[in-house]
Structures are given as structure tokens and as C-alpha cells.
Image (spheres, helix red, strand yellow):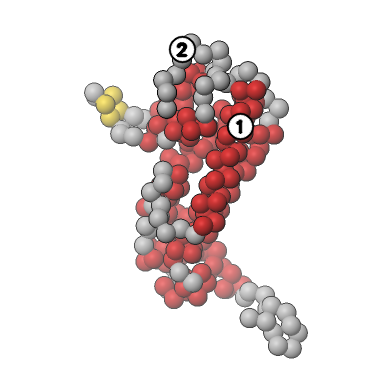
Amino acid sequence: MVDKVTGEVPKERADSRRKRLRLIEAARAAIAERGLQASTTDITERAEVGVGTLYRRFGSKEALVADVLIDGISEIQSWADAALEDPDPWAGLSGFLFAFTEAQLANLGLAEFTSGNARELPAEVAERGSVLADSIDRLVRRAQDHGVLRADVTWRDLVLISIAPMGGTECLGATRGEGQWRRTIAIALDGLRSPAASILPPD
């Protein structure tokens, strides 16, 4: 609301700002643990505020969830941008793949978004996802232009590899440990290197 005398927007009160930050942090934790369907109650109880405070600050739970998700995607986008600036195309691509995989493993809500299971999100969220996909495509093409990534790999292969460690936890008595995902990605990266030992099947 604009002050009628000064014409300026008054600064947010300190206690109001603290509540807003608590809600954001609580939403991040709830979404990471429970996914994008984390309840309003779960978020407000973690933030130690009333439900009314959430609606006054953000308008709806969905708006708060979208804000948090956009922040998460923006962070991953910054990793992709840094990878594109890395003078070593292979180091940039492989470092991004490790970071992207770990982020999805650590955040159920983010994994739901990248897997297409998120619904009723603002268009801006989908747009951020499209920009990220384009950056990953550029990472792949740059590595191929430098001859370090096999020519028949696409950005789709890379993002699907990133979700490979998210399957079951046990197979034929072998149990997946906390660090197994790093081994999985390292093995996959060896298969991505150029020159290729075989020809990939079609999509």
C-alpha cells in the first residue's frame, strides 16, 4: 500500500519480514520432504505462524510453493550457467550432472517438477524449466563440439540419466547405499565420453 502523504511504499516491519522468511524456509523444508503437495498446516507449523499469516503474505499456499520452486530452479540454472562458462567442457557438463542429480535426490518437490508430476503451477515455473532445458542442451552441444562427448547423445539422455538413481533401493539382495548415486553417475559419464564404443539404439 502506498503512503498517501509521501507517495512511498512503507518498508516491511521487522517482525513481518521474519515471519515471511520463516514461511519460505518452512516451505522449502516441507516441499523437499513431502513434495509439492505439502500441506498448509505442515508449512505453517514448521514456521510457527498461523494459516492466516501465510495467506496474508503470499495469497495462497500454491503461490508460496511456486515461489520456492522458482528459487530452486533458479539455483540449478546458475549451476548450468557456470558450467557453460567452465573452460573445460567435460568438467562443466559432468559437474553439472552430479549437482543436478543430487538436487533432485535431496528435494522431492523438485524431483516431482522435473519428472512432470507437478500440476497447477504458474506458467513462469514451466518457462524456467524450458530455459534450463535449453541450457542443458547447450552444455551437451558444446561438449560435442569439443569432441569430448559422444555425438549421438542428446540433452534428453543427460536429464534422464540424472533421475536414474531415484529408483528402488534393493535388487537381488544388493542394497543401494547413500553414496551409490555417485557411482551410478560416474559409470554413466564413462559411457558418455567420446569416442563411443558402440552405437546407441534409437530414442
Q: Secondary structure at mark 2?
A: loop
Towards the viewer: 118 or 25: 118
Q: Residue at x 36, y 30 (%)?
A: 177
Report the residue that reaches farthest toward the bottom: 5
Q: Is residue 121 left or right of residue 145?
A: left
Q: Earlier in the sequence, mark 2 or mark 1?
A: 1
Coordinates of residue 118 in the picture (x, y in percent): 41, 52
The residue type indicated by label 2 comes to Ser
The answer to whether residue 191 is seen in the rendering is yes
Report the residue that reaches farthest toward the top: 197
Quadrant (top left, top right, bottom left, bottom right) of the C terminus: top left
Q: Residue at x 44, y 19 (%)?
A: 200
Coordinates of residue 100 in the picture (x, y in percent): 51, 37
Query: Residue 198 bears which disc, if any?
Result: 2
Coordinates of residue 119 in the picture (x, y in percent): 40, 55
On screen, residue 8 above or below 4: above
Quadrant (top left, top right, bottom left, bottom right) of the N terminus: bottom right
